Amino acid sequence: MAFSAHGQTILPSEPPCTPSTCTLQHFGAVRADTEALYGDVQQALSAHERAALRDDQANWRRLARRHCQQQAPVGSQRDASQASRHHFCMIEQDMQRRRQLRKWLMQGDFTQ
């Protein structure tokens, strides 16, 4: 969950769960915070940088899903431990993305 201090959003830097305890709710909360940060960064950028960040965000989403499907595949079977590992993987991807988004905020388009 995000907290506010002096008008700035502070996001946790550690996952809220372990590979064996992550739930869809944990992942949803982390993803919501990451998407909120993405929206904040979008507002701070120029039009050119916003377009570049949109493309970068779409690419990141695709790569994160692919990475976690390879690392902790979720099949048609409802295996809770496998789902937990997959959610944890996705949470780790989101935590990395937050660091990238903060770079965008501080430095602008760093994909060039």
Image (cartoon, helix red, strand yellow):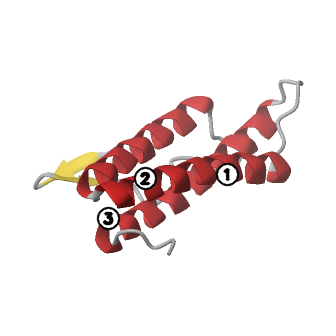
Q: Secondary structure at mark 1?
A: helix
Is mark 2 in CB contact (under 8 Å) with mark 1? no
Q: Name the residue furthest front.
A: 48
The answer to whether residue 15 of the structure is visible from this angle is no
Q: Residue 80, located in which quarter of the rendered image? A: top right
x, y percent for residue 103: 39, 70
63 horizontally vs 91: left or right: right
In the rendered structure, which disc, 2 or 1, sits on the residue that comes first in sequence?
Answer: 2
- Taking depth in this image into account, of 112 and 62 the one nearest to the observer is 112
Is mark 2 in CB contact (under 8 Å) with mark 3? no
In the rendered structure, which disc, 3 or 1, sits on the residue that comes first in sequence?
Answer: 1
Mark 2 = which residue?
A: 51
68 horizontally vs 50: left or right: right
x, y percent for residue 19: 69, 49
x, y percent for residue 112: 50, 75
Which residue is rendered at x = 48% and y = 43% of the image? 30
Q: Which mark is residue 64?
A: 1
Q: Which mark is residue 47?
A: none
- Taking depth in this image into account, of 75 and 112 the one nearest to the observer is 112
102 horizontally vs 29: left or right: left
Which residue is rendered at x = 26% and y = 47% of the image? 3
Q: Secondary structure at mark 3?
A: helix
x, y percent for residue 104: 38, 66
User: Distance of mark 2 from mark 3, alpha carbons?
Assistant: 14 Å
- Reply above or below: 106 against 40: below
Mark 3 = which residue?
A: 105
User: Distance of mark 3 from mark 1, alpha carbons?
Assistant: 21 Å
Q: Quadrant of the N terminus?
A: top left
Q: Amino acid at mark 1?
A: Ala
In the rendered structure, which disc, 2 or 3, sits on the residue that comes first in sequence?
Answer: 2
Q: Residues within 10 Å of mark 1 (few under 14, many from 20)?
A: some
User: Distance of mark 2 from mark 1, alpha carbons?
Assistant: 20 Å
